[in-house]
């Protein structure tokens, strides 16, 4: 058996042993609530929605059809993780390709864990002259290690325990962003 097969078997086994914390219906209901809240606040704001690559693309794809008002869409790519499970320095791979000056911007990401990356994106957008920068995440992790003690997402679908999560946009070693629902890695 070659190393790629062994690695994929380990990735599959990890998924099979993981604990489901939120099934697909629970995730869909959370996205519905987020969409309702976002619509209530931004339907007349002509917002720019920025998906944070790679994790925010899944939530953005599910969220956009539920937002029945005009908006522009683009993306940003900044990360502290890459395919690692440990965060490092923030690496910018792509800045927004639409001017944010004078705009209301909604930044959509998969999870607010510690929040260094999301906070850096928010601060960058404010520095570029955005009038208002709001954040939307599918998961806000419960713990007291946030980048700033008062840092919260403006729109959060679910609050989940401080475990290693994957599915619905979140990954395990680059895999399982496509898993329906949200899972916690066994033992982590």
Image: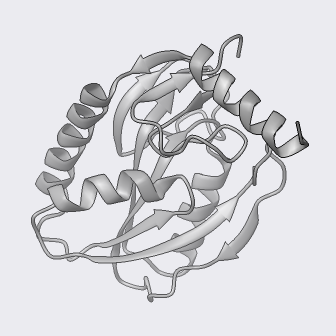
Q: Is residue 116 above or below residue 46?
A: above
Q: How many marks?
A: 0
Residue 99: image quadrant is bottom left
Q: Is residue 70 above or below residue 155?
A: below
**Quadrant of the rendering where the C terminus is positioned:** top right
* Residue 187 visible in this rendered orientation of the protein: yes
Residue farthest front in this picture: 1
* Residue 85 visible in this rendered orientation of the protein: no
Q: Seen in the image, is 32 located left or right of residue 115?
A: left
Residue 78 percent location from the top left of the image:
66, 64
Q: Is residue 149 above or below residue 174?
A: above
Q: Is residue 143 above or below residue 148?
A: above
Q: Which residue is nearer to you in this view: 120 or 179? A: 179
Residue farthest top in this picture: 187
Residue 20 percent location from the top left of the image:
46, 17
Residue 31: image quadrant is top left
Instruction: Name the residue at 36% across, 83% down.
Output: 102
Q: Which residue is nearer to you in this view: 163 or 172? A: 172
**Quadrant of the rendering where the N terminus is positioned:** top right
Q: Which residue is nearer to you in this view: 3 or 117? A: 3
Instruction: Name the residue at 24% across, 43% down.
Output: 34
Residue 173 percent location from the top left of the image:
73, 41
Residue 184 percent location from the top left of the image:
57, 20
Identify the coloring.
Answer: one colour
Q: Seen in the image, is 169 located left or right of residue 138?
A: right
Instruction: Name the residue at 66% across, 40% down.
Output: 147
Instruction: Name the residue at 48% across, 45% down.
Output: 178
């Amino acid at each position: 058996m070659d190393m790629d097969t062994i690695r994929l078997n380990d990735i599959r086994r990890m998924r099979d042993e993981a604990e489901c914390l939120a099934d697909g219906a629970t995730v869909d209901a959370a996205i519905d609530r987020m969409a309702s809240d976002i619509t209530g606040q931004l339907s007349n704001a002509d917002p720019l929605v920025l998906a944070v690559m790679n994790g925010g693309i899944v939530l953005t794809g599910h969220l956009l059809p539920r937002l029945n008002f005009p908006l522009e869409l683009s993306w940003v790519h900044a990360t502290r993780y890459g395919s690692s499970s440990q965060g490092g320095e923030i690496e910018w791979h792509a800045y927004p390709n639409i001017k944010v000056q004078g705009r209301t911007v909604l930044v959509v990401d998969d999870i607010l864990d510690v929040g260094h990356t999301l906070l850096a994106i928010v601060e960058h957008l404010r520095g570029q002259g955005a009038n208002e920068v709001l954040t939307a995440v599918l998961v806000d992790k419960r713990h007291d290690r946030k980048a700033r003690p008062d840092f919260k997402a403006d729109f959060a679908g679910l609050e989940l325990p401080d475990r290693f999560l994957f599915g619905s946009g979140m990954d395990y070693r680059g895999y399982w962003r496509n898993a329906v629902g949200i899972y916690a890695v066994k033992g982590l």
